[in-house]
Image (tube, helix red, strand yellow):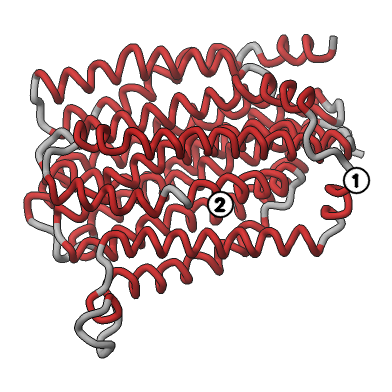
Amino acid sequence: MISNTNDISSFYLRKNFSLAWPLALNALLMQAMLIIDVLIISPLGEVALAAMGIATTIIAFFMGLQFALGNGTQLIVGKMFGANNTQGLIQSVYSGLFINLFATLVFFIGLNIWSNALISVLTSDRAMATHVLEYLSVAQYILFFNSITQIITVFLNGQGNTKTPFKIYLIEVPFNAIISYLLVFGLPGFGQESFYSEGLGVIGAAYGSLAAICLRFTLLFLHIRQQNIWSLIHTHCLFNTTAIGKHFNEIIPIAANFLVLSVGNTVYQLLFSQLALSSYVAITLVFPWLRIATQLIVAWAQANAITITQAIGQAKLSHITPIINNSIKLGSILACVVAFALYCLSLGINNIYPKVEQNVLIALATIMPLYVALPLIRTYNTVSGNCLRAIGKSTYVLKIHFITQWLITLPLCAAFILYLELPLFWAFALLPFEEALKSIPLYLMLKKTPKILNNLNK
């Protein structure tokens, strides 16, 4: 029995670490797949790199929506698991899966109808547009498998089993790297008229990613088949419109929080694509590393959210304030570690990309202070935002994200790039500026946590 605040803090710190490290490494491996694709494609030149940047931005936009819907389901799974509500647990997975697959189908149809028009807006370079269309023609099928694997993953994560998805990614990442490399560049000695000797180019990376996610789907499916989970799934109704409607109403504000950020980041990248080619290539190279570096913080925030929802399900509301306080304190330490790692990256960036043009390296050097400082500001917002969503304040967090990003910084970014034609540094500086704006209202709401918890008790 946990009897005092110190015992509560110690218990939940250990629990959160056990949840967070597989989540962090799992997310790192996910981002590593994008890094691998960029490293593989980089010898093909600036046009291929820029094309891949546009194509992966479009795919990442919808994966952001899938991630958003999945995170909403994950918080519900955590509450149901904490309350030991097996029927609610399984039904939440069915409902989440239906909603995720339906959204994927809508996006798939829209992409097939409007992809040419969208790409013509993003680039006038015919060679680049061809590469983008080729990549999307394959990558769009990744979304269906990702939809299913995302729900299986949050089902496991919400119950505290974050290790299984991590182990599967350990297999998937090297598989993706090997298959993508062979498909992009081919194998010598197989004749001059086939792709085995010359490779498929950019589209080969898409085929490699599709093969890798099929492997992930197979391994996750085999895992749940081998567990008692499978027998539980078969004992509950697969399609329940009432449950799906209720589930949607619960996750929509939570999903919208993630969606606003995801779409906003996509708009940022699309605006950055209007900069000089060397500047956009620099952003294409640094963004995956930036996402990788901050995954430790994101995983820590998600682990705390899972713990908070389980505590709510168990009616242990007095434990939540110590969880939040400790998560913020440790998050500040993690932010310093991440900033130092990004600084080390900046010192060796020309060794990582030795064939990249000098103009790109100069562009990377100009934004180095900004991307090193970014996690120092963003960490507090990430941790506090996840904590507030877990205790039911997702709508408030949504308003903060929408106002600061969509009403302030994105219009400024558009003005800087499209009208004032300012250099890369000033456009990129809006990212830490946005985080600074968000921190104030998030801090004010977190101070009201005891009052929010009292309302939950009622």
Give how far across and how far down residue 71 sits, in percent.
61, 35
What is the distance, in whole Å, between disc 2 and disc 1 at their CAs? 24 Å
Looking at the picture, which amino acid does disc 1 mark? Thr
10 Å crowding of disc 2: few (<14), some (14-19), many (20+)? some
Residue situated in front as seen by the camera: 216 or 27: 216
10 Å crowding of disc 1: few (<14), some (14-19), many (20+)? few
State the count of labels: 2
Reading the image, the residue beneath label 2 is 145
> Is 197 located above or below residue 157 in the figure?
below
In the rendered image, is residue 10 in sight? Answer: no
> Is 33 located above or below residue 2 in the figure?
below
Disc 2 and disc 1 in contact, CB within 8 angstroms: no
In this picture, residue 123 sits left or right of residue 391: left
Occupied quadrant, residue 147: top right
Give how far across and how far down residue 343 sits, in percent.
29, 49
Q: Which mark is residue 388?
A: none
Sequence-first tag of 2 and 1: 2
Q: Quadrant of the N terminus?
A: top right
Q: Secondary structure at mark 1?
A: loop
The residue at the point 40 percent across, 29 percent down is 263
Looking at the picture, which amino acid does disc 2 mark? Phe
The residue at the point 36 percent across, 45 percent down is 290
Reading the image, the residue beneath label 1 is 235
The residue at the point 16 percent across, 46 percent down is 365
The residue at the point 16 percent across, 65 percent down is 354
Give how far across and how far down residue 35 sits, in percent.
35, 57
Q: Secondary structure at mark 2?
A: helix
> Is 280 located above or below residue 319 in the figure?
below
